[in-house]
Image (spheres, grey):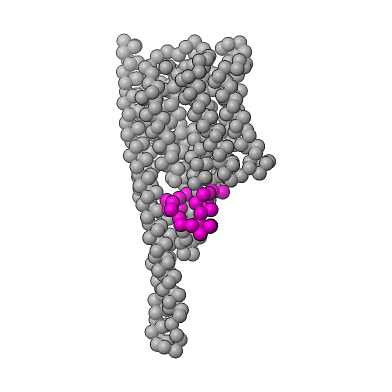
């Protein structure tokens, strides 16, 4: 009877995960639509501003002695145009910098990443769908836990599904204070990839844990690891965008054409780097506790704090990479693209640790269920 209930809860969990993946997919499309639509709107604003500037230049060249009254009325109309429709057209979104001036090809989103009074319908729809998807996803995680009779972190399937949920939840929590909707396509895209990988490559039926995992340290150690990994996911997306934005800014400064109009909704490279650094610093503290608590758990489970197990080694490698990133940026002046690449390398190590190491390296931490 109990086995039947557990199996049923497991089936409900899989259904919720499928529904969450579908909802996230629609949200991903909405986020992409927002970027495309806003980019098109900003290009239209540029053209309008250029036309107004050209009209103003033409009006200024009218001889004073010829039709002074007409010229004056034309000048009045031009001024009215600039302060009226054009002024409104310059602000399709609060993300456009240089308010009060004509929009330019090199403008990017406000570095403070604060919300403005704009109404971007696709972005609002995307966020609402993400909230709905996260609620469904939470139901999937909870039913998996009920079916297993424990926290759902015992194998790769459960870690990926829970990790994807935490990444989305952290993204939504940060959205309360900062306008990071430009990260939506990246974060939701990664969540979809994690759910698909969990269902196709790492699916594991509901079951009991191996004896080494039957400890309260599982909750402490893995919960901090999942939360830190979610924060690293955000900084990975920011660092990738930083590289693209930095290249775009250099191209525009050199007089080149702006071929990435949607990046105008993204803050400048320096703002992305600064926020990424702050979040990485918080995640690094969490990863330090992950390493420490893992060693304590290892001593209680196997009688030693450190055994050079593959998983332990790669957990330490991740710590070293992010420690090097924080140190290099804070004291050695490693800013800009070098800092972004270090952050990306750190996240690739995280991905390697939780996929390749679990799947292809045998050791005491081989709990992937494969």
- Placement of 76 over or under 261, stated as above or below: below
Question: Which residue is at a point 63% across and 42% down the rendered structure image?
Answer: 334
Residue farthest bottom in this picture: 65
Q: Where residue 33 sits in the image (x, y, percent)? A: 35, 47
Question: Which residue is at a point 61% across and 44% down the rendered structure image?
Answer: 335
- How many numbered markers are drawn? 0
Q: Which residues are magenta?
A: 246-270
Q: Quadrant of residue 183?
A: top left
Q: Main secondary structure of the magenta part?
A: helix
In the displayed structure image, the side of residue 258 where residue 2 appears, left or right: left
Q: Is residue 163 among the parts visible in the rendering?
A: yes
- Placement of 313 over or under 112, stated as above or below: above
Q: Where residue 291 sits in the image (x, y, percent)? A: 59, 24
Q: Nearer the viewer, residue 175 or 184?
A: 184
Q: Where residue 357 sits in the image (x, y, percent)? A: 50, 22
- Placement of 363 over or under 350, stated as above or below: above
Does residue 265 show up magenta in the picture? yes
* Quarter the N terminus occupies: top left
Question: Which residue is at a point 50% across and 15% down the rendered structure image?
Answer: 362
Does residue 12 show up magenta in the picture? no
Q: Nearer the viewer, residue 159 or 138?
A: 159
Q: Where residue 145 sits in the image (x, y, percent)? A: 41, 21
Q: Is residue 110 among the parts visible in the rendering?
A: no
* Quarter the C terminus occupies: top left
- Placement of 54 over or under 273, stated as above or below: below
In the displayed structure image, the side of residue 330 where residue 139 appears, left or right: left
Question: Which residue is at a point 61% across and 10% down the rendered structure image?
Answer: 303
């Amino acid at each position: 009877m109990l086995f039947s209930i557990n199996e049923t809860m497991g089936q409900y969990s899989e259904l919720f995960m499928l529904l969450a993946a579908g909802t996230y997919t629609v949200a991903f499309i909405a986020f992409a639509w927002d970027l495309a639509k806003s980019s098109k709107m900003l290009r239209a604003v540029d053209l309008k501003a250029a036309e107004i500037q050209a009209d103003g230049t033409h009006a200024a060249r009218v001889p004073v002695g010829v039709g002074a009254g007409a010229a004056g009325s034309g000048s009045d109309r031009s001024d009215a145009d600039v302060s009226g429709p054009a002024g409104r057209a310059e602000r399709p979104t609060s993300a456009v910098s240089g308010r009060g001036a004509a929009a330019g090809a090199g403008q990017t989103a406000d570095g403070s990443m604060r919300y403005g009074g704009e109404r971007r319908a696709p972005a609002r729809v995307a966020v609402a769908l993400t909230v709905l998807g996260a609620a469904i996803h939470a139901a999937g995680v909870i039913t998996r836990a009920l079916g297993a009779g424990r926290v759902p972190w015992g194998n790769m399937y459960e870690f990926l599904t829970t990790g994807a949920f935490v990444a989305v939840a952290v993204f939504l929590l940060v959205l309360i204070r900062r306008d990071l909707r430009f990260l939506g396509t990246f974060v939701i895209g990664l969540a979809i990839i994690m759910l698909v990988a969990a269902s196709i490559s790492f699916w594991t039926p509901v079951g009991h844990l191996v004896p080494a995992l039957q400890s309260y340290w599982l909750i402490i150690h893995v919960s901090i690891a999942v939360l830190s990994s979610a924060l690293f996911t955000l900084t990975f997306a920011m660092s990738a965008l930083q590289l693209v934005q930095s290249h775009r800014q250099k191209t525009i400064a050199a007089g080149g054409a702006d071929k990435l109009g949607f990046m105008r909704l993204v803050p400048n490279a320096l703002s992305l780097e600064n926020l990424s650094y702050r979040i990485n610093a918080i995640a690094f503290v969490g990863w330090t506790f992950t390493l420490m608590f893992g060693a304590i758990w290892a001593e209680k489970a196997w009688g030693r704090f450190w055994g050079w197990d593959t998983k332990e080694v790669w957990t330490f490698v991740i710590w070293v990479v992010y420690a090097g990133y924080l140190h290099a940026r804070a004291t050695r002046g490693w800013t800009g693209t070098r800092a972004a690449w270090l952050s990306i390398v750190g996240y690739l190590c995280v991905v390697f640790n939780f996929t390749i190491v679990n799947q292809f390296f045998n050791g005491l931490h081989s709990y992937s269920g494969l």
